[in-house]
Amino acid sequence: MKICVTAIKPSLEAPVDPHFGRCNYFLMVDPVTMDFKYINNRHVSASGGAGVQAAQETIGEGIDVLITGSVGPNAYSLLSSENVTIKSFCSGSVREAIEAYRSGSLENIDAANSPGKHGL
Amino acid sequence: MKIAVASGKGGTGKTTVAVNLAIALGSAQILDCDVEEPNCNLFLGYDLEKQEDVEIMVPELDSGKCTLCGRCADLCQYNAIAKLPRSIRLFPKLCHGCGGCTLICPEKAIIEKRRSIGLIEKGTNENCSIELFQGTLDIGEPMASPVIRQLQAHIDESTVAIIDSPPGTACSVIASVAGMDYCVLVTEPTPFGLNDLVLAVEVVRQMNIPFGVVINRNGLGDGRIEDYCRTESIPVLMRIPFDRDIAVLYSKGIPFVEAMPIWKENFRELYKHISKSVSYRGGV
Ligand code: SF4
Ligand code: SF4
């Protein structure tokens, strides 16, 4: 099982970054061993389509679950088509997010909850 | 002569200036480039006739031919293509129609299809020789510039074309002001007005288009706009007072030059000033 958590810094103690497409780092965490690898978000300031890139990259990593604060419509449609479960968590560290996930206390994000940003 | 009427933000009276200027001249073209909210016709009341659709080319995928090589997704600068492990997904609303993905696909799995994003309409009136072209961007479409460019193709160089630009300083404003002979910036004497004017001035200066300022609702706020224009040596072309009669006419959708002949003269003076500064630059 692989969980992607969006984070401000590449560390388990870093705060969760609330914006999926525009976060600084994606942390892929194994919730059992707490081993993780991270990817820099190269599209953090893209003028449009940052969410599409973020979804493409994290789906390419083979994630099962995404923990973040908000997801735009394009990213949501990609993630849900690949059966990625999206969970909401926006205040606390990456480690706390994983713990909350394991205890079953995180709510699902069932629809895009950010307007996203198209084109210009 | 091509004159753009622009403003750093909405609601400053840009449309009023464009329409009144056209009517004062008697013979002119108005191109309403505020394609998300065209409103010149609120003052003109013409019957509009559809001219054409505005179409852009967008890619379409033949997934049977696609081998998932991912080149198209890597190429697209606008993130309009996502490569997933088992499929390619296109996002037409992010696509800028550059055509690159169609060219790069080794399997010819991407073809270009036309997609309509808006329309162009025309209105005229037998009583006066003012021609209106109006562009409308379909709701939810993100790209205004193709509609604006297509509108500008209707400019008649033999008359005066007045372009009502979209508010702000985004791409669509640049598209509408580009290639014009002169730009009139409409502003209000308020702190917000000044702030937006400064941004708009930066844009037109970079585009190297001569410009001047019209202060609308003059007397409403303070003198900061005047001070700014003086220090920056920007001509103030006209001051439209904050006046009850003008406001009443506006609310009824009547261009105030029609009811107040003195303003017809004032707008003609404004035009003379513009032609002078354009010819001074070696333009028309
Ligand atoms: S046409 Fe250009 S912008 Fe549109 S999807 Fe293809 S590469 Fe991207
Ligand atoms: S370039 Fe062509 S073959 Fe390759 S992924 Fe894109 S559509 Fe498929």
Image (cartoon, helix red, strand yellow):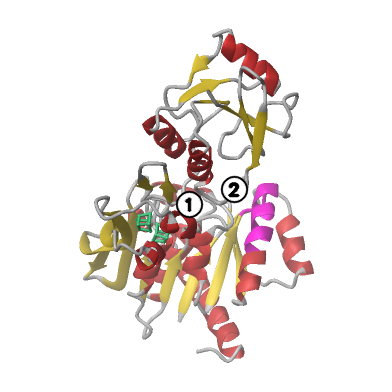
Residue located 42% across and 43% down the image: B84
Quick check: A54 above or below B190? Answer: above
Q: Decide whether residue A104 is among the magenta residues.
A: no
Q: Could you tell me what secondary structure mostly forms the magenta stretch?
A: helix
Q: How far from the left and from the top, in percent, is residue B181? A: 52, 79
Front in this rendered view, residue A31 or B140:
A31
Find numbered disc 1 in the image and state the secondary structure of the residue it sits on: loop
Q: Single out the residue that lies furthest toward the bottom.
A: B282
Which residue appears at 43% of the width and 39% of the height? A74
Give me the chain letter of mark 1. B
Q: Secondary structure at mark 2?
A: loop
Look at the image and give the residue range highlighted in magenta: B188-201
Residue B147: x and y, percent?
36, 62
Disc 2: which residue: A43
Residue B59's quadrant in the figure? Answer: bottom left
- Image quadrant where residue B21 sits: bottom left
Disc 2 marks a residue whose amino acid type is His
Position of B107 with respect to A111 (left or right) is left
The reply to the same-chain question for discs 1 and 2 is no
Dot 2 alpha-carbon crowd within 10 angstroms: few under 14, some 14 to 19, many 20 or more: some
Residue B199 is at least partly visible in this image = yes
Q: Which chain contains the residue that carries disc 2?
A: A
Ligand 1, what quadrant?
Answer: bottom left
The three-letter code of the residue at mark 1 reads Asn
Asked whether the viewer can see residue B34, the reply is no
Residue A86 image label: none
Residue that numbered label 1 is attached to: B79
Residue at point 66%, 48% (across, down): B192
Give the x, y percent position of residue B34.
Answer: 42, 57
Q: Are marks 1 and 2 in contact (CB under 8 Å)?
A: yes
